[in-house]
Image: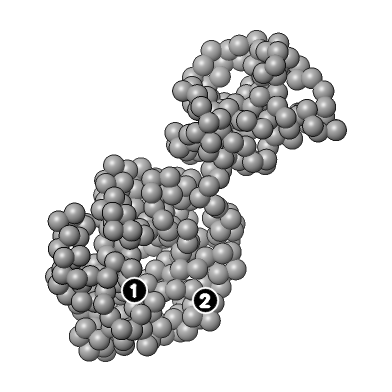
Amino acid sequence: MAKGISVFLGLDWSLEDNLEYLTQAAQAGFSRVFTSLHIPEANYSQLISEFKQILDLATGLDMAVIADISPNAYQYLQVEAHDLAAFKKIGLAGIRLDYGFAPELIASYTNNDAGLLIELNASTMSAEFMQQIMSAGANAKNISACHNYYPRQNTGISLESLQRKNQIFHHYNVPVSGFIGLATGRRGPLYEGLPTLEFTRSFAPQVSAQILLAAGIDHVFIGDAQADLPALQRLGKLTPDIIELDVADYLPNPIYSELFQQIHTNRPDAAADIIRSQESRLMLLENNVIRREVLAENCVVRNKGSITIDNIAYGRYSGELQICKRDLAADERVNVIGRINDDSLHLLDYIGDNQRFKLVI
């Protein structure tokens, strides 16, 4: 899994802003950069003058830059038509072919001698068009795919569509990228976020990213223009094998706090109603500081997202941490010790057999 940012030239951010953002992202663990060379609202004289400086810094930071192009981009960059070596020479790792390219031309591009990666539009691809590309002799090892981001509200794609499109590319072992939006640092002219999935438009970025990964996305990009440093650092630490759930509130009891920030594993026989930590009972028994019984407290209704721990009344289950996947009635044997926040509720369905997870406070 690689992580990437987007850098937009000729818009709201100065060259200095973008250069600093590149540096911060690289330090946070991001290795890829997406930029677009056909944004109608951009100042193209400014865009082209800044483009080389962005590429030079990205190269120095060992970040691969992919540029979204249309046939007009050859003119903007003063590159001869179909001269892929020229794109590589100016510092691009790859080009994303957004529209206006026939299957035979795409196939020929994938066999270029310059080592330039050819990226396809995952959101608009059909199985038939992909088959035409491959039948024309395309080199699948030199292809990647990237979904669109959607600046206008209500235009992002559905989860079902994303997964269906992903399957087209994964059939040929082609990796797929997708975008997440931000609440701040949004790109104009609409400033409504740049996600791939519509239902994630207002989600916290770490939640949106994990949804994309769980849905089969291989690489995650921030679609919007300027994530703040805490968001970069949080996203940079995400790993695809551990789902992070943000805790909204919790009881300040030392018995319970030992269980937060630990890595838990859902049981291999995942329950229908709850997520069950395999490690929690052992964690409490082996801790020398808090080796004591879990007494009954706050035995209230368990709403979806409630974090609970079984108390001594549950016998051998005492000390088991659980997260409710649906609303459950109060039980005098079960303490409600906290809850995950609303955005993280959307991650519960992805915690299946043997899935590792962490509660972040």
> Left or right of 328: which side holds 250?
right
Query: What residue sits 17% from the left and 75% below the top?
Result: 105
Which element carries disc 2, helix, strand or loop?
loop
Which element carries disc 1, helix, strand or loop?
strand
Image position, residue 224 (x, y; %): 42, 60
Residue 49 visible in rendering = no
Label 2 Cα neighbours within 10 Å, binned few <14 / some 14-19 / many ≥20: few
**182 or 162, which is in the foreground?**
162
Q: Amino acid at mark 1?
A: Leu
What residue did someone put label 2 on?
A: 62
Numbered-mark total: 2
Image position, residue 148 (x, y; %): 30, 58
**300 or 3, which is in the foreground?**
3
Q: Are marks 2 and 1 in contact (CB under 8 Å)?
A: no
What residue did someone put label 1 on?
A: 117
- Where, by quadrant of the figure, is residue 149 drawn? bottom left
Query: What residue sits 50% from the left and 28% below the top?
Result: 270
**339 or 16, which is in the foreground?**
339
Label 1 Cα neighbours within 10 Å, binned few <14 / some 14-19 / many ≥20: many
The quarter of the image holding the C terminus is top right
Image position, residue 106 (x, y; %): 20, 72
> Left or right of 264: which side holds 43?
left
Residue 19, above or below 240: below
